[in-house]
């Protein structure tokens, strides 16, 4: 039972990383074409209703405050960071879906590099979001290592886990 739950967490983590990578790609492309003034305007529009209802709303105030302090250089850095991060995540997920076990060490190395950067960010600019993301990435790295060590491809794990979730026998 524990093994099946870990398999399910691994598959959900891979799915989340793929979706996260797509969102980062879209966000990076958008940031390449958006000026700080446009971002400030979008932040104001997106949060105006919430701030009218609750002027002390933490999330809305963080968004407005963050947008107000953006500069062109920081937007370009964020865009490039999101694009690189997104491309790497999407490439890892695609390679895992194609069925190559050789991608596991590369996936762990790439996620490990992101993890090191996140640890640096956590030390220099602590935040709950980065802490949660760091723990999540560490768990995904461990689950990827576990999967690689077991010698299974993603599709094998997928088939067995889906069968377990829906309580069907696995056809080999």
Image (spheres, rainbow, N blue to C red):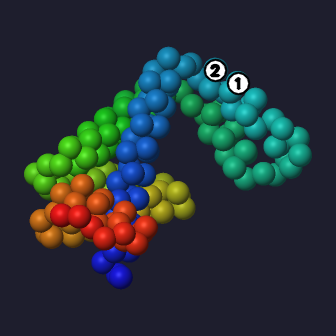
Horizontal side of 77 relative to 141 (left or right) equals right
Rendered view: 75 above or below 3 = above
> Residue 51, which numbered label?
none
Label 1: which secondary element: helix
Label 2: which secondary element: helix
Residue ID at (14%, 69%)? 149
Residue ID at (73%, 34%)? 46
- Tell me the residue that label 2 is attached to: 38
Between 52 and 153, the one nearer to me in the picture: 153
Examine the rendering and report whether any part of residue 141 can be seen. Answer: no
- Tell me the residue that label 1 is attached to: 41
Residue ID at (48%, 63%)? 132
Rendered view: 108 above or below 18 = below
Horizontal side of 74 relative to 59 (left or right) equals left
Give yes or no for contact between labels 1 and 2 (Cβ–Cβ under 8 Å): yes
Question: Within 10 angstroms of label 2, few (less than 14), some, or many (20 or more) residues?
Answer: few
| Cα distance between the residues tagged 1 and 2 | 5 Å
Q: Position of residue 8 (x, y in %)?
A: 37, 66
Between 65 and 89, the one nearer to me in the picture: 89
Question: Within 10 angstroms of label 1, few (less than 14), some, or many (20 or more) residues?
Answer: some
Horizontal side of 59 relative to 12 (left or right) equals right
Q: Position of residue 113 (x, y in %)?
A: 25, 52
């Amino acid at each position: 039972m524990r093994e099946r739950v870990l398999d399910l967490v691994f598959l959900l983590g891979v799915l989340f990383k793929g979706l996260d990578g797509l969102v980062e790609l879209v966000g990076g492309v958008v940031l390449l074409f958006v000026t700080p003034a446009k971002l400030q305007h979008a932040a104001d529009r997106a949060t105006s209703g919430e701030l009218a209802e609750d002027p002390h709303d933490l999330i809305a105030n963080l968004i407005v405050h963050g947008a107000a302090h953006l500069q062109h250089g920081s937007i370009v850095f964020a865009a490039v960071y999101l694009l690189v991060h997104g491309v790497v995540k999407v490439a890892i997920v695609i390679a895992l879906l194609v069925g190559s076990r050789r991608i596991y060490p590369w996936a762990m190395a790439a996620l490990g590099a992101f993890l090191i950067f996140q640890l640096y960010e956590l030390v220099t600019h602590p935040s709950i979001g980065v802490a949660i993301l760091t723990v999540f990435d560490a768990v995904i790295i461990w689950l990827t290592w576990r999967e690689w060590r077991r010698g299974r491809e993603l599709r094998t794990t997928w088939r067995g886990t889906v069968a377990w979730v829906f309580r069907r026998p696995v056809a080999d």
